[in-house]
Amino acid sequence: MNRLVNPAKVLRTLRKTPILLEALLEGVTQEQAETLYDGDWNVVFVVSHLRDFEAIAAQRVRDLLAGPNPTFAAVSNDELIRDNNYAAADLHQVMGEIARLRRELITLLESLRVR
């Protein structure tokens, strides 16, 4: 049977992403991360956003597994920034949170039986 998505490849990609992020930001200090901007967001904001969407994606997977026709609430970037205090976030702590959340998602996905 042909699959549109190869589960093993998806899991490999999910495992690599935090490693690549860590390599990309190796040697970047907190000060640099707070002062280097891409448009309106600095590096800390971008990484914090990745962390928040890691948690949102995992919740959406759980919602999908819980039953048919889940609904997903819209997420406001401005609310995430304010509620999770991106301005005071520690770059390396946030990166650790991304890695932890990703490991939890991978564990969940690995527990599923592929049909």
Image (spheres, rainbow, N blue to C red):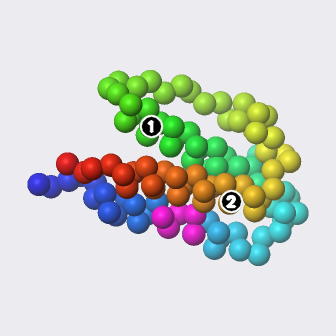
Query: What amino acid is found at the position of numbered circle 2 in the picture?
Result: Met
Q: Residue at horizontal 76%, vertical 75%?
A: 27
Disc nearest the viewer among 2 and 1: 1
Position in image of residue 109 (x %, y %): 39, 51
Question: Tag 1's secondary structure?
Answer: helix
Q: Quadrant of residue 65?
A: top left
Q: Residue at horizontal 56%, vertical 39%?
A: 56
Q: Quadrant of residue 92?
A: bottom right
Q: Magenta segment: does it hold 94?
A: no
Position in image of residue 2 (x %, y %): 15, 55
- In the picture shown, does residue 82 fall above or below 86? above
Residue 65 in sight: yes
Q: Which residues are magenta?
A: 15-19
Q: How many marks?
A: 2
Q: Crowdedness of circle 2 by 10 Å Cα count: few (<14), some, many (20+)?
A: many
Which badge, 2 or 1, is on the more N-terminal residue? 1
Q: Residue at horizontal 48%, vertical 64%?
A: 15
- The reply to whether dot 2 and dot 1 touch (C-beta < 8 Å) is no
Q: Crowdedness of circle 1 by 10 Å Cα count: few (<14), some, many (20+)?
A: some
Position in image of residue 54 (x %, y %): 57, 47
- In the picture shown, does residue 8 fall above or below 1? below
Position in image of residue 89 (x %, y %): 81, 50
Q: Residue at horizontal 62%, vertical 50%?
A: 50
Residue on which disc 1 sits: 62
In the image: residue 9, left or right of residue 43: left
**SS majority, magenta:** helix
Residue on which disc 2 sits: 95
Q: Quadrant of residue 31?
A: bottom right
Q: Magenta segment: does it hold 18?
A: yes
Residues at marks 2 and 1, CA–CA distance in whole angstroms: 22 Å
Query: What amino acid is found at the position of numbered circle 1 in the picture?
Result: Arg
